[in-house]
Image (tube, grey):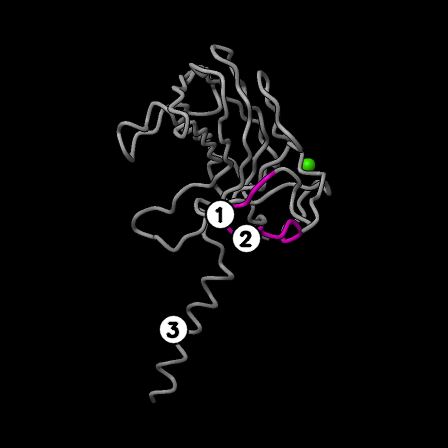
Amino acid sequence: MKKILLAIPALLTLASVHAADPRIQNVRPIITLNAAKDENTLTPDAASDTMQVENLTFGPEDQRPFIIRAKGLKTTSTAGWKEYSLTFTPANSGYVWLSLEGEYPPKEDPDLVLKVDFDDVSVEGAKIVNGDFEEKSADAGPKAWKYSAEAIPNDSFAGESDSSYVTVTANNRIGQTITVRAGEPVTVTFKARAHTPPIE
Ligand SMILES: [Ca+2]
């Protein structure tokens, strides 16, 4: 009897893997721009019609003016890549850390992992290196970018395009430093989609 009872949770786990949670197929890409190290004030331009662009609304209050968090409208894997853009203006010349991220899971389901694919990141008003992720570094990761954790394999979801892209989550981000000039607006444009393949 004990054996049967133990087998039930295992079966439930299997079932939940196969029946994909619709929330993982409906995700929001996040971009963080961080100039806290140099205390460089970043002013968001709220005019984007694809992203909500604002200074950080959580964390230490004295750092918030130096950090922008931009959250995209939802994207899916079924509709293919969706284009996003946002603009901000730095007060001073210097370095800004640009980070591509996924959403945090909902409070009621902290184990849910929301994976987002990013590709074709381009920047106007500053320089970005390898924004299309096609150039590889010696360890086979994308050149010029730095993961906060392990790289999620590119081939786990081939999708429509055979070109290289990156997959990120809330805790497994990828970023690089861009150089900005005082008072010169910077526009970041990119493509994103949900990483999870559509339900068959
Ligand atoms: Ca690419």
Q: Which residue is mark 2?
A: 150
Front residue of 128/191: it is 128
* Picture coordinates of residue 48, whole percent (x, y): 47, 18
* Picture coordinates of residue 183, whole percent (x, y): 47, 10
Picture quadrant of residue 10: bottom left
Q: Which residue is mark 3?
A: 9
* Picture coordinates of residue 54, whole percent (x, y): 37, 23
| Disc 1: CA contacts within 10 A as few (<14), some (14-19) or many (>=20) | some
Q: Which residues are magenta?
A: 145-156
**Placement of the N terminus among the 4 image quadrants:** bottom left
Give the alpha-carbon distance from disc 3 to disc 1, as whole Å: 29 Å
3 or 1: mark nearer the eye: 1
Q: Is the residue marked 3 within 8 Å of ligand 1, measured from its CB?
A: no
Whether tag 2 and tag 1 are in contact, CB under 8 A, the answer is: yes
Front residue of 187/159: it is 187
Front residue of 146/114: it is 146
Q: Quadrant of ligand 1?
A: top right
Q: Is the residue marked 2 within 8 Å of ligand 1, measured from its CB?
A: no
The reply, left or right, for residue 84 in relation to residue 106 is right
Could you tell me which secondary element the residue under label 2 belongs to? loop
Give the alpha-carbon distance from disc 2 to disc 3, as whole Å: 29 Å
